[in-house]
Image (cartoon, rainbow, N blue to C red):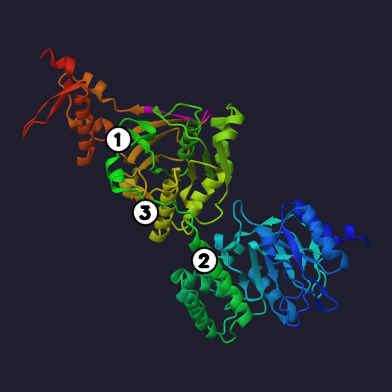
Amino acid sequence: MNAETNPLLDAALALAVQGVKVFPCHRVVDGECTCHDQGCKSPGKHPRTKNGSKDATTDERQIREWWTKYGKHGRLNFGQTLAGRAVVDVDVAEGKPGEAQWAALSDGQGTRDTLTYRTGRGGVQYVYRLPAGEVGGKENGYGPKLASAVDFKTGPNAYVMVPGSKTVDVYTVIADDPTALLPEWITAVARTIEPYTIRASDGSKVSVGGCNFWGMTLVDLDAIPVDDDRRGNNWLTAVAGHVANMHPDKPDVVRMVCSLINGKSTEPISTHDFDKTVNSVLSMEAAKQAGTDGVPDSFTNGASFFQNVPDVPPAVWGSGTEVLWAEGEALQIAAPQGVGKTTVAMQLVRALGGLQGTVLGFPVKPRKKVLYLAMDRPQQAARAGNRVFAKDDPERLTEYLTVWQGPPRKDLALYPEELLRMCQDAGADTVIVDSVKDAAVGLSKDEVGAGWNRARQIALQGGVEVLELHHMVKNGADGKAPDNINGVYGSTWITSGTGSVILLWGEAGDPVVQFRHLKQPVEEVGPFHLIHDHTTGVTSIQHAADLVQLVKASPKGITALDAAKAMFETDKPDRNQKEKARRKLAKLVTSGVLVEAPGSAKEPTVYRMVSDALFD
């Protein structure tokens, strides 16, 4: 057969066209691996190049060069990396029970037709694509196994062989179906930390899950039974990662502790594999320690920090003391689903690009480049944005706005530097996070909330303005809108690290919703009722208590209680609401619009128009 039309080469090039990276591996020829190592533990499946899967590419010229060097002589296999994809690998070699375990796992779950391979040792590999935005591996919380003989391979450094490769036999395609989306039940098993038992059709027990080592503590990893086959290289990687984080400058201590833990196993990992795994972890830790780890330097002198402070913070959104979004501080818009937080955010994005001057009547300062993280239902965000941007200049949108679709590359609470890195990769000085629940998993936990707060603070310190959309809000008293910051769902750190929190409240699809400014950089703005025009995507203020008009309509003047009733639409305003109303009235006195007649122990202070007071 002509070497240039060999099925293996054709398969590798076809994958490259699809964006799948491939790299050269050794091949089994006449029963021996071409590496000529008599003790080879992975014949025909280990890389030929020094950097292994990190050398993978989609470049046709490089692939053909590898083919010319090794393939024409029948000494080449190709590996394909699994960034954004996952493979369920059912192992039946040497009598392993992969087929029975997979049958037990998938019984009643419903499987999807997808691209399927037969491996060189008779097993089966089901190829799936991950949800948009996921790269796979530990960054997305996946473990390496579903059961003892059912591996789960995923991530940019994981790989399987390209069809046409040969180990004991040749890898073949047995179902050339389109690659299906990974079923949710497989995702759940792959992310399970605690193992559990199910029964196969023959009544035998199958241990499932429990290989998500990235979610385990060092104590958890050490507690895995010494005869448990989960105590393999992936387990050791997680152990070494924990120990290296505890002793980043003491590699000998890391090796000693890992050796002690590994030595407890009934079948300890071999010296060769132990050294390879631990040294790899130590190299990554050393690289991290040598750099800045993504965190910008933050030293400044005391005089500049404490004395060069404006009386009123400059606003990204707002003016004077009515600041909705202060520079260098995060703004969070919290709301139940469907009440318009994305609609308001889209108008802010438009104003940040200089395409409109105000949002809700308050000026917005344009920024150079905006990154919109459309992590929650991207297509819905696209529809909301279409109503706002449909008639705008596409060149201007391309120039200042970049959109990321789907979940982030990593959990941003676990990897807080990643938010700033994403902004840097996009060249953005402003980021819209839609929404927080998709950026960090487990928001009710303080460690997750603290991790997310660190992510936002690193981004702010790096010169990026942050706007967050937060889905879930608890009901206030009697099912009403929350009236303070404690009503926002999640760990206290979700809101503690923000400079401003706005609450939108109503029922999904309501054209009119409530606007409350729960946390303020300076003065409280509102409360308002907002009108969403769902046709144009424009939001406006329907009603704001106009205290000047209220005073004009009251010849005898009004009190702080009267003002609070109008502002907060309640017959019984609380102490804080009355104080907020008093401050607004006092501000109008200072500006010369109103005058006050001081009250007494029995009579409240009355506020009147200056013009009325002149004729008393």
**Label 2 to label 1: alpha-carbon separation:** 44 Å
Query: Label 3 is placed on what type of residue?
Result: Trp
Q: Which residue is mark 2?
A: 286
Sooner in the amino-acid sequence: mark 1 or mark 3: 1
Task: Please name the predominant secondary structure of the magenta segment in the image.
Answer: strand
**Extreme residue toward the bottom, this view:** 266
Q: Which mark's residue is nearer the viewer, 2 or 1?
A: 2
Q: Confirm or deny contact between disc 2 and disc 1 (CB under 8 A).
A: no
Q: Which quarter of the figure has residue 219?
A: bottom left
Tell me residue 325's x, y (percent). Answer: 38, 38
- Picture residue at 74% right of the left edge, 52% below the top: 18
Q: Which circle marks residue 312 in the picture?
A: 1
- Number of labelled discs? 3
Give the residues drawn in magenta, as a range: 535-542
Query: Could you tell which of marks 2 and 3 lies nearer the N-terminus?
Result: 2
Between marks 1 and 3, how big is the CA–CA gap? 25 Å
What residue is shown at x 34% (from left), y 43% (from top)?
480
Question: Is residue 547 rendered to the left or right of residue 468?
Answer: left
Comparing labels 2 and 3, the label whose residue is closer to the camera: 2
Instruction: State which quarter of the image contains the C terminus.
Output: top left
Compared with 244, 136 (above or below) is above
Residue at x-position 39% and y-position 57%: 450
Q: Are marks 1 and 3 in contact (CB under 8 Å)?
A: no
Upstream in sequence: badge 2 or badge 1: 2
Mark 1 against mark 3, which lies toward the viewer? 1
Q: Which residue is mark 3?
A: 493
* Residue at disc 2, secondary structure: helix
- In the rendered structure, which amino acid carries the disc numbered 1? Val
Q: Secondary structure at mark 3?
A: helix
Instruction: Please name whichever residue, 435 or 505, is drawn nearer the observer in this view of the structure.
Output: 435
Q: What is the quadrant of the N terminus in the image?
A: bottom right
Q: Callout 2, which amino acid?
A: Ala
